[in-house]
């Protein structure tokens, strides 16, 4: 069983690092492609023994499970490029935030009658095998396909199947969650340093306290509030600290954060579904290099001065008034 | 090597659970004592195979490393009681927040010329072997005593030696830290539920995200800010969320929390050092049962006005 990654950035790197550490797949059976060969993550992948290429087609032909590990707005170009090369055996796993199964299937159905698609949302701690992943299965996916993905993702952390309509909320919670945690540890360490601790020790203790608490909760049947009560002895230091946090609306800030991330994810999905994205925005990605790939034509898919149709352009067809080339 | 616990509450239970899971000591070589035999933690300890007794003296006799796992204001009574039974071999490890090495040594010096004392601050995740512990060695503790404690505590998480003057700050950070995390996890789960997730899944994902992030940080050479940057793609969902956190002063709340816990710890230590505590406050503990222990006399406690904690010898009353 071979695994391929379209894209060799943060996500591909994190997943490969985790998979390799868990031994679930050997790195020489992994192939990754990216137009940009100088990315530090691409170098790191090579060092791990992964085959790194600039050709997405090569990745497709050499893999059975194919992860789409590129940014959401690149997905349609990639699908256009590799669509003709998808075979029966391929399981396409999209990790792109906000990109729906139906939009991917719609693209691939132009080339294949029953494309097997799974949508997943993971997070960077897969790198240390403590990720949080959810997935939803597409129309033509069989039970063994989902079992295969679960086997891969369970090797690098928690993995659970969900209904697709929950995935944006998961993005807001555990997708973005590590960033909330990194911010929290930075602040806790500042607190420790303010009260006299050296920085390194403060970071260490802050991270360890969060890790230990999270592990206690995962291993426990108790409500987080009960565990919090157990730490807060009468008149003690902890309850004084908790009061300060509550006074500042600490809990509310975290609810806001989860909500904001989820809403933005839905917003990005909506923009993509509207099938319009400004050429300027695309230019900011590695569009030029994407366009240089064989199979992606510059004429019909992109680059007209007005809007760009993402999900509805076929290689040789043009939408109504966008055909100005 | 035998380990004893004066006190059979949350801390003793968490440490014993961690030690036995780590295999660093067998449960039958652990003795714990408490006047209150009905505590759920007592039942838990018994189930693990620990020798449980109501006699602190028995615990002292049967142990080499003796953890004082009682609340700070109980410490002086315990020291009065077991002081005469301390031998050369004993290593006294106090886990009580805010109780200084010098106050403990002062008490024990009434009975022994060179009592070996270590002060430590740990936290409840020792129960899952992911604790955070710091310790400071007393005047008469040898290098091998520190190493012995470190070997025990490192089996249940992170452990490092520090200067004693840092311990109150550590209390504010990693001592209280788990409570900050539990509060955060409750709120994150609320956020997930608000956006449509079932509660159990939301709690699970929130805890897993924190655990994974903390592990990444511990395993990494990088600054937490760098790791945060790596998760924030341009115009993406995460940076939108972070803006909300920053707008609400999220970081400041956490700094405040660490500060408040540390300050309160110092306050409690100061009150104890002043050697005054109201009888009402003591009554809230299991004083009656403490007083029933052989060796603790009425003369060291309980005068109607104030009670001197650290300066009374058993037979002397302050005027």
Image (cartoon, coloured by chain):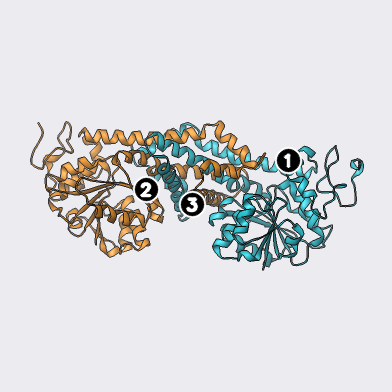
Chain colours: A cyan, B orange
In the drawing, what numbered circle is on residue B219?
A: 3
Using the image as rendered, state which of residue B141 and residue B51 is in the foreground: B141
**Residue A142: quarter of image:** bottom right
Q: Quick check: B294 left or right of B24? A: left
Chain on which label 1 sits: A
Front tag of 3 and 2: 3
The mark that comes first in sequence, 3 or 2, is 2
Asked if the residues shown at circle 1 and circle 3 are in contact, with their CB atoms under 8 angstroms apart, the answer is no
Secondary structure state at the residue bearing disc 2? loop
Chain on which label 2 sits: B
Asked if the residues shown at circle 2 and circle 1 are in contact, with their CB atoms under 8 angstroms apart, the answer is no
In the drawing, what numbered circle is on residue B136?
A: none
Residue drawn at the location 45% of the way across and 55% of the way down: A220
In whole angstroms, how far apart are the C-alphas of marks 2 and 1? 48 Å
Q: From the top left corner, tell me how far across and down residue A74 is, in percent.
A: 74, 48
Q: Is residue B193 visible?
A: no
In the drawing, what numbered circle is on residue B123?
A: 2
For the residue carrying disc 3, how many other residues have a C-alpha within 10 Å: few (<14), some (14-19), or many (20+)?
few
Q: From the top left corner, tell me how far across and down residue A237 is, in percent.
A: 35, 38
Q: Image quadrant for the N terminus of chain A?
A: bottom right
**Residue A22: quarter of image:** bottom right
Q: From the top left corner, tell me how far across and down residue B286 is, in percent.
A: 24, 45
In the drawing, what numbered circle is on residue A284?
A: 1
Same subunit: marks 3 and 2: yes
Residue drawn at the location 36% of the way across and 55% of the way down: B154
């Amino acid at each position: 069983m071979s695994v391929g990654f379209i894209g060799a950035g943060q996500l591909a790197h994190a997943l490969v690092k985790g998979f390799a550490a868990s031994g679930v797949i050997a790195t020489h059976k992994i192939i990754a492609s990216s137009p940009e060969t100088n990315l530090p993550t691409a170098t790191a992948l090579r060092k791990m023994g992964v085959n790194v290429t600039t050709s997405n087609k090569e990745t497709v032909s050499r893999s059975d499970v194919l992860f789409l590990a590129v940014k959401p707005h690149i997905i349609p170009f990639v699908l256009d490029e590799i669509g003709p090369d998808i075979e029966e055996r391929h399981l396409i796993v999209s990790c792109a935030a906000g990109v729906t199964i139906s939009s991917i299937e719609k693209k691939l159905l132009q080339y294949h009658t029953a494309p097997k698609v799974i949508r997943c949302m993971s997070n960077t701690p897969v790198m240390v095998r403590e990720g949080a992943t959810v997935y939803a299965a597409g129309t033509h996916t069989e039970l063994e396909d989902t079992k295969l993905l679960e086997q891969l993702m369970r090797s690098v952390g928690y993995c659970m199947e969900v209904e697709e309509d929950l995935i944006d909320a998961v993005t807001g919670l555990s997708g973005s969650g590590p960033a909330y945690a990194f911010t929290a540890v930075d602040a806790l360490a500042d607190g420790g340093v303010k009260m006299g601790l050296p920085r390194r020790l403060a970071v260490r203790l802050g991270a360890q306290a969060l890790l230990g608490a999270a592990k206690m909760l995962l291993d426990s049947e108790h409500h987080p509030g009960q565990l919090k009560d157990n730490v807060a002895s009468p008149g003690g230091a902890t309850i004084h600290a908790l009061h300060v946090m509550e006074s500042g609306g600490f809990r509310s800030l975290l609810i806001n954060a989860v909500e904001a991330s989820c809403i933005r994810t839905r917003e990005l999905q909506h923009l993509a579904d509207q099938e319009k994205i400004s050429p300027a925005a695309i230019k900011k990605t590695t569009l030029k290099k994407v366009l240089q790939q064989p199979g992606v034509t510059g004429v019909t898919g992109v680059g007209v001065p007005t809007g760009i149709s993402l999900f509805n352009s076929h290689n040789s067809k043009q939408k109504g008034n966008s055909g100005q080339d």
